[in-house]
Image: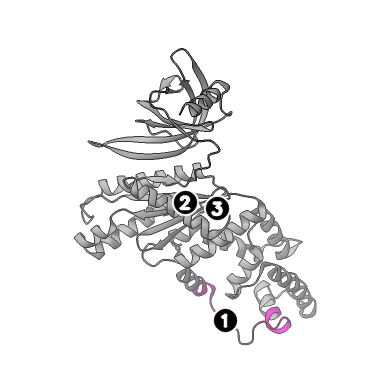
């Protein structure tokens, strides 16, 4: 049966779980599930039961059921002189021993799988729907909390989508949504969750992904959307189609689901306000010292691999870092070698990391970028003294 592209990762996981039923291993299904749980941190005991019964169980309860099932299957084999198979043994155990089901219905698995897929899939884009996204995000944050891992959330929104519907009609808008859904599907890994969040909004849950790597994924998708609709001819809206994105990460930006979504949304709104067709990362100002405007106090030159980083000037500076304006789109997470001139006769070598990047239109199709650079090894002594003296003078 041909798999729906948006749930290919989910279906691979389902078939892997179902394969445990037919594996002939000494430790049985329970042993296989225990091993998979230790490798992934996922509630696989409950997941497999849900696949087979369409009923939800807490994972601890599901594990007890699998343990009881194995003993029951062995008892049936001994009494009947033959193995009845995993599905019949489980059905009998849940109905006659556990008595969890009163009037169970027998259904062909392909039919069940099709029904389940429809319940979690957005019918237009083929991506996961909002309900599945909400449940998956909650499950992912719980997993991160339990195992001390990280995850990133990308919120995406098509730019000026109402204009597409108004000028070309809703069928054209549906085509755009389908195409964007397909492009998003091609970008995510099997462990990622790509969903239609609602209307022209999309979302990606990226497990084990820091914010800088999430920005790379989202920025590539943004570029692919822009290029795809520029190339496409015939039946495609004649106006440009672009997408904006916002990123927040657990646990750096938020420690619960609601705040993570809220902060990814804040980054998305910042991208919209900044001119659209861009991806922003959530940041919160955490300054232990005030920033000083550069003005005539000094300047900064950035060198990468021995070459200048385009036209660049410093805007303000503090003991923790520096904000620069540059014509070159630096990369989030990029390590920079900087030379900071604090007077005419003295320059300091400073190592920094790009932790914030914002794009601003500069007219005539030009762009400039504000880049927040954090000092990687703390504030140099000479610069720290200069900042103290400048603060007193002001």
Do we see residue 336 in this rendering?
no
**How many residues crowd around disc 3 within 10 Å: few (fewer than 14), some, or many (20 or more)?**
some
- Placement of the C terminus among the 4 image quadrants: top left
Asked whether the residues under the numbered discs 1 and 3 touch, taking CB atoms below 8 Å apart as contact, a structural biologist would say no
> Is 122 on the left or on the right of 258, as rendered?
left
Residue on which disc 1 sits? 106
Q: CA distance from mark 3 to mark 2?
A: 23 Å
Which image quadrant for residue 47? bottom right
Circle 2: element type: loop
Q: How busy is the neighbourhood of tag 1: few (under 14 within 10 Å), some, or many (20 plus)?
A: few
Q: Is residue 270 left or right of residue 384?
A: left
User: Whole-Å distance between the Cαs marked 1 and 3?
Assistant: 44 Å
Q: Earlier in the sequence, mark 2 or mark 1?
A: 1
On the image, the x and y values in percent for residue 117 come to 48, 68
Q: Earlier in the sequence, mark 1 or mark 3?
A: 1
Using the image as rendered, state which of residue 76 and residue 373 is in the foreground.
Answer: 373
User: In this figure, which residue is indicated by the disc labeled 2?
Assistant: 188
Look at mark 3 in the image and give the residue it sits on. Answer: 254
């Amino acid at each position: 049966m041909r798999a729906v592209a948006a749930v290919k990762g989910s279906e691979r996981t389902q078939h892997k779980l179902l394969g445990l039923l037919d594996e002939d291993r000494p430790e049985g299904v329970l042993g296989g599930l225990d091993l998979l749980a230790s490798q992934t941190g996922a509630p696989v005991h409950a997941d497999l039961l849900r696949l087979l019964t369409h009923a939800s169980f807490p994972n601890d309860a599901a594990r007890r059921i699998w343990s009881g099932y194995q003993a029951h299957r062995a008892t049936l084999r001994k009494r009947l002189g033959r193995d009845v198979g995993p599905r019949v043994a489980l059905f009998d155990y849940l109905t006659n021993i556990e008595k969890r089901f009163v009037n169970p219905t027998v259904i062909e698995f392909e039919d069940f799988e099709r029904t389940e897929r429809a319940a979690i899939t957005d019918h237009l884009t083929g991506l996961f729907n909002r309900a599945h996204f909400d449940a998956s995000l909650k499950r992912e944050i719980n997993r991160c909390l339990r195992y001390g891992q990280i995850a990133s959330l990308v919120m995406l929104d098509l730019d000026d989508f109402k204009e597409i519907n108004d000028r070309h009609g809703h069928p054209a808008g549906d085509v755009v949504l389908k195409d964007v859904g397909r492009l998003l599907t091609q970008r995510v890994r099997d462990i990622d969750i790509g969903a239609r969040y609602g209307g022209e909004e999309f979302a990606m849950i990226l497990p084990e992904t820091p914010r800088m790597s999430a920005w790379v994924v989202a920025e590539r998708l943004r570029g692919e959307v822009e290029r795809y609709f520029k190339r496409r001819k015939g039946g495609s809206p004649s106006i440009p189609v672009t997408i904006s994105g916002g990123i927040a990460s657990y646990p750096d930006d938020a420690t619960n689901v609601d705040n993570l979504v809220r902060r990814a949304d804040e980054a998305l709104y910042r991208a919209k306000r900044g001119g659209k067709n861009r991806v922003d990362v959530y940041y919160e100002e955490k300054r232990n010292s005030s920033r000083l405007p550069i003005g005539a106090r000094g300047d900064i030159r950035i060198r990468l691999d021995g070459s200048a980083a385009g036209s660049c000037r410093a805007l303000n500076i503090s003991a923790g870092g520096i904000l620069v304006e540059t014509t070159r789109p630096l990369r989030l997470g990029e390590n920079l070698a900087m030379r900071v001139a604090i007077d005419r006769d003295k320059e300091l070598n400073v190592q920094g990391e790009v932790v914030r990047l914002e794009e601003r239109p500069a007219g005539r199709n030009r762009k400039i970028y504000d880049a927040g650079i954090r000092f990687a090894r703390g504030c140099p002594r000479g610069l720290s003294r200069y900042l103290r003296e400048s603060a007193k003078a002001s």
